[in-house]
């Protein structure tokens, strides 16, 4: 869990700095934001899947195995939904900030 948090912080900071969002090419900038959002979702999904596999492996064999696995899946699904919502909100904010910055720069001309 700590690895995921560190990765997300670094990823968010890096995405905001690395994306070259040009107000002169707003469609390209929006497409770049969307591409970065989808890329991050895929990366987090891979991490999530690996974490789920590890969690399921902790369920011991026997009568309690299926309830254990069901609970681990339920917890993982909740965690995934939270992570996905965080990513979507962050990139939505990035898009809105970009559009606001472009409107402000246009108003100053």
Image (tube, rainbow, N blue to C red):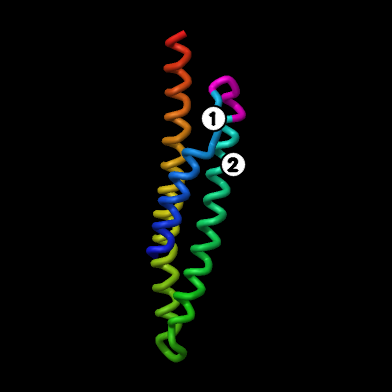
Q: Earlier in the sequence, mark 2 or mark 1?
A: 1
Q: Residue at x 60, y 34 (%)?
A: 31
Q: Quadrant of the N terminus?
A: bottom left
User: Closest to the observer: 50 or 69?
Assistant: 50
Residue 90 belongs to magenta span:
no
Percent coordinates x, y for residue 57 in the rendering: 48, 80
Quarter location, residue 64: bottom left
Q: Which residues are magenta?
A: 23-28
Would you call the spot at circle 2 few (<14 residues within 10 Å), some (14-19), or many (20 or more)? few
Mark carried by residue 35: 2
* Vertical order, 97 against 60 (above or below): above
Percent coordinates x, y for residue 41 in the rendering: 53, 51
Q: List the residue tagged with mark 1.
A: 21
User: Closest to the observer: 54 or 102?
Assistant: 102
In space, the residues marked 2 and 1 are separated at their CA atoms by 13 Å
Which of the two discs, 2 and 1, sits closer to the camera? 1
Q: Residue at x 55, y 25 (%)?
A: 22
Q: Residue at x 43, y 53 (%)?
A: 8
Do labels 2 and 1 touch, CB within 8 Å?
no
Q: Residue at x 56, y 54 (%)?
A: 42
Percent coordinates x, y for residue 90 in the rendering: 42, 42
Percent coordinates x, y for residue 30 in the rendering: 56, 31
């Amino acid at each position: 869990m700590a690895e995921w948090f560190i990765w997300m912080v670094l990823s968010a900071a890096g995405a905001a700095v690395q994306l070259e969002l040009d107000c002169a090419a707003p469609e390209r900038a929006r497409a770049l934001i969307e591409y970065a959002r989808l890329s991050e979702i895929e990366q987090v999904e891979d991490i999530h899947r690996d974490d789920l596999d590890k969690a399921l492996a902790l369920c011991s064999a026997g009568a309690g195995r299926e309830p254990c696995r069901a609970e681990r899946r339920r917890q993982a699904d909740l965690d995934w939904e939270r992570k996905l919502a965080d990513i979507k909100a962050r990139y939505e904010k990035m898009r809105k900030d970009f559009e606001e910055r472009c409107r402000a720069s246009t108003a100053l001309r």
